[in-house]
Image (spheres, grey):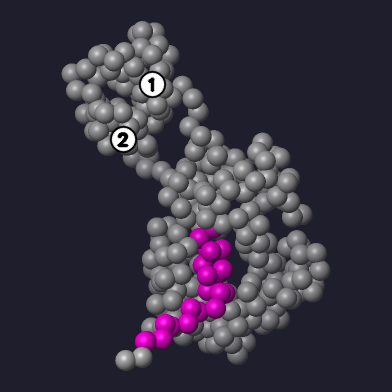
């Protein structure tokens, strides 16, 4: 699993040549921030590559590796992009990633207050920051982690009750009330490989790669990464060897595509958060979207 400081960013560009650095400056390329800085002879300022100040002429620009080098050259820090200050988006992303790791690894559910305190923010600010970057609330992320655990435990634990409590549910009743949303079938059917259950499936595209979505008449039973139809179906068949797998009709496929499109992680998070965390968020939102009632078609006005 990727570490919290591992970002889903383009790491193929090193910004080592002046030509590449000049292009990054012209593009206000945020990916270049931290790789280098630039100073402008006519203004005496040094800035980040993403600074939105009007670009200087190429002959007036000097590229620098560090802010210390810029200050040693007699340049002053730009007040707009504040190149000496930590990037707040990156700091927020690190805090969110750490909170997600805590939820991933904690045996007991963590409260919003505990997560916010650990991150060093107020409950309100942390909640807003978390949703801005991930597209889900901390509670929804925790619910997604717990649901993933119970699906894993049902396949390996000695009994259904053992699986429920090992996954962090406080009571059987609480789990059974949520089980159609989590499993798409009864716990016994899920545990037994879906005997007699009909599962329809389809694949939709996302920014994180193809996603295979499978559902029964009770709810979503699987949301899986799918590099192509075949590997996704192979995984699905391994989970439910006794079920009847069938391709979803056009209506199901259309709805899944629309839900996956709405479930895309927000742009700031896609740039800064690890891919595995974004995948959890995407799959959680897909399940939420498909669990909601299908919007009723608008009636045509009478002629």
Q: Which of 30 and 183 is in front in this view?
A: 30
Mark sitting earlier along the chain (1/2): 2
Residue tagged by mark 2?
28
- Residue, disc 1: 78
x and y, in percent, of residue 172 in the image: 80, 72
> Residue 175, can we see it?
yes
> Distance of mark 1 from mark 2, alpha carbons?
15 Å
**Which residue lies at the image location 43% right of the left edge and 83% below the top edge?**
297
Q: Which mark is residue 94?
A: none
Residue in the image at 47% along x and 82% along y: 296
User: Magenta stretch: residue 292 in it?
Assistant: yes
Residue span colored magenta: 281-301
Q: Is residue 142 visible to the viewer in this orientation of the structure? A: no
Q: Which residue is drawn at 40% across and 11% down?
A: 71
In the picture, residue 95 is in which quadrant? top right
Contact (CB < 8 A) between labels 1 and 2?
no
**Residue 115 shown in magenta:** no
Give coordinates of residue 11: x percent, y percent. Answer: 38, 39
45 w.r.t. 28: above or below? above
Secondary structure of the residue carrying tag 1 is loop
Of the pair 51 and 256, the residue shown nearer to us? 51
**What SS does tag 2 mark?**
loop
């Amino acid at each position: 699993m990727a570490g919290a400081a591992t970002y889903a960013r383009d790491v193929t560009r090193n910004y080592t040549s002046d030509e590449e650095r000049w292009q990054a400056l012209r593009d206000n390329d945020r990916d270049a921030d931290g790789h280098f800085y630039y100073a402008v002879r006519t203004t005496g300022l040094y800035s980040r590559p993403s600074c939105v100040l009007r670009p200087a002429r190429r002959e007036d620009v000097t590229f620098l590796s560090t802010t210390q080098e810029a200050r040693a050259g007699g340049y002053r820090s730009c007040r707009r992009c504040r190149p000496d200050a930590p990037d707040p988006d990156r700091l927020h992303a690190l805090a969110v990633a750490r909170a997600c790791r805590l939820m991933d690894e904690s045996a007991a559910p963590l409260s919003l207050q505990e997560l916010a305190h650990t991150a060093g923010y107020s409950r309100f600010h942390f909640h807003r920051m978390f949703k801005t970057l991930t597209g889900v609330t901390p509670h929804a992320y925790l619910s997604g982690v717990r649901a993933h655990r119970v699906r894993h435990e049902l396949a390996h634990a000695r009994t259904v009750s053992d699986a429920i409590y090992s996954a962090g549910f406080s009571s059987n009743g609480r789990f059974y009330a949520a089980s159609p949303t989590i499993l798409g079938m009864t716990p016994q059917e899920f545990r037994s490989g879906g005997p007699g259950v009909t599962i329809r499936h389809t694949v939709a595209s996302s920014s994180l790669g193809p996603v295979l979505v499978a559902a029964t008449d009770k709810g979503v039973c699987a949301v899986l990464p799918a590099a192509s139809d075949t590997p996704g179906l192979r995984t699905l068949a391994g989970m439910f060897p006794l079920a009847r797998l069938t391709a979803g009709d056009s209506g199901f496929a259309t709805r899944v595509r629309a839900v996956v499109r709405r479930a895309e992680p927000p742009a700031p998070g896609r740039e800064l958060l690890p891919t595995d965390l974004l995948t959890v968020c995407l799959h959680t939102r897909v399940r939420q979207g498909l669990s909601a009632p299908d919007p009723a078609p608008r009636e045509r006005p009478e002629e």
